[in-house]
Image (cartoon, grey):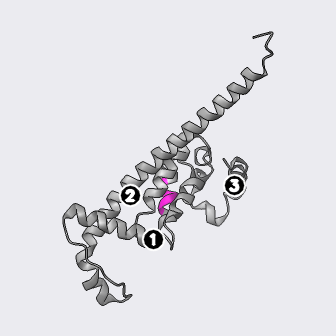
């Protein structure tokens, strides 16, 4: 865990909370829950961040900040996990969401080429927006829940392994005559 980095970020934000770019958030930005490193806050923020990555609008950061402030989740993790949707992964993610939505609605999958003009938006995207948005919603919920609970399992297994390792070292350190 990058505890030092998060602590430095918290101190940086706390000292600059009265600047114009952080004044919008008021005292909520210095809420300790936004910067805590416990399992619940981290795993929930990761799940929400992955789910927010499926929103087909370029406002992931604003939505992530709103969710972090309203749900009191770890802000840096939530912001970083929205970056699962980047220029390299956006096309496969959104095509997968369209594929899921088409199969749920029972509509055929239409292959198309993107053209940045109004005619394409009206006629090319028109018949495809319902399966696309439904697929984005279903994919966001499924992948967000899956990401959260997989991270939860990984976190718990790492804690168990550290406990066993620490316990084995303590047992091994006891002299044989005292055991």
Mark 3 vs 2, N-terminal side: 3
Q: Nearer the viewer, residue 130 or 114?
A: 114
Q: Disc 2 designates what residue?
A: 140
Query: Which quarter of the figure has residue 173?
Result: top right
The structure residue drawn at horizontal position 69% and vertical position 55%, both measured from the top left corner, is 9
Can you tell which of label 3 and label 1 is closer to the viewer? Answer: 1
The structure residue drawn at horizontal position 41% and vertical position 54%, both measured from the top left corner, is 143
* Secondary-structure class at tag 1: helix
Q: Nearer the viewer, residue 155 or 167?
A: 167
In the figure, 170 relative to 120: above or below? Answer: above
Q: Nearer the viewer, residue 106 or 71?
A: 106
Q: Position of residue 126 (x, y in %)?
A: 25, 79
The structure residue drawn at horizontal position 20% and vertical position 63%, both measured from the top left corner, is 105
> Is 3 placed left or right of 77 in the picture?
right
The answer to whether residue 113 is magenta is: no
Q: Disc 3 designates what residue?
A: 9
Mark 3 and mark 1: Cα distance apart in space: 29 Å
Can you tell which of label 1 and label 2 is closer to the viewer? Answer: 1
> Is 111 placed left or right of 38 in the picture?
left
Which numbered marker is on residue 90? 1
Mark 3 and mark 2: Cα distance apart in space: 28 Å
Work out whether residue 57 can be spotted.
no
Q: Nearer the viewer, residue 157 or 57?
A: 157
Mark 2 Cα within 10 Å, few/some/many (few <14, many 20+)? many
Q: Position of residue 37 (x, y in %)?
A: 62, 43
Work out whether residue 152 can be spotted.
yes
Q: What range is drawn magenta here?
A: 63-67
In the figure, 4 relative to 153: above or below? Answer: below
Q: Position of residue 123 (x, y in %)?
A: 25, 85
């Amino acid at each position: 865990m990058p505890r030092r980095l998060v602590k430095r970020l918290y101190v940086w934000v706390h000292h600059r909370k009265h600047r114009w770019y952080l004044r919008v958030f008021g005292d909520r930005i210095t809420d300790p829950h936004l910067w805590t490193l416990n399992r619940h806050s981290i795993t929930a923020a990761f799940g929400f961040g992955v789910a927010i990555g499926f929103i087909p609008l370029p406002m992931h950061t604003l939505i992530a900040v709103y969710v972090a402030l309203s749900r009191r989740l770890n802000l840096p993790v939530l912001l970083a996990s929205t970056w699962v949707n980047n220029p390299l992964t956006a096309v496969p993610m959104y095509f997968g969401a369209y594929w899921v939505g088409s199969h749920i609605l029972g509509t055929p999958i239409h292959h198309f080429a993107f053209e940045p003009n109004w005619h394409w938006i009206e006629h090319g995207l028109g018949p495809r927006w319902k399966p696309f948005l439904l697929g984005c919603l279903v994919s966001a919920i499924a992948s967000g829940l899956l990401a959260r609970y997989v991270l939860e399992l990984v976190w718990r297994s790492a804690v168990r392994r550290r406990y066993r390792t620490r316990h084995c070292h303590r047992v091994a350190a006891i002299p044989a005559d005292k055991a």
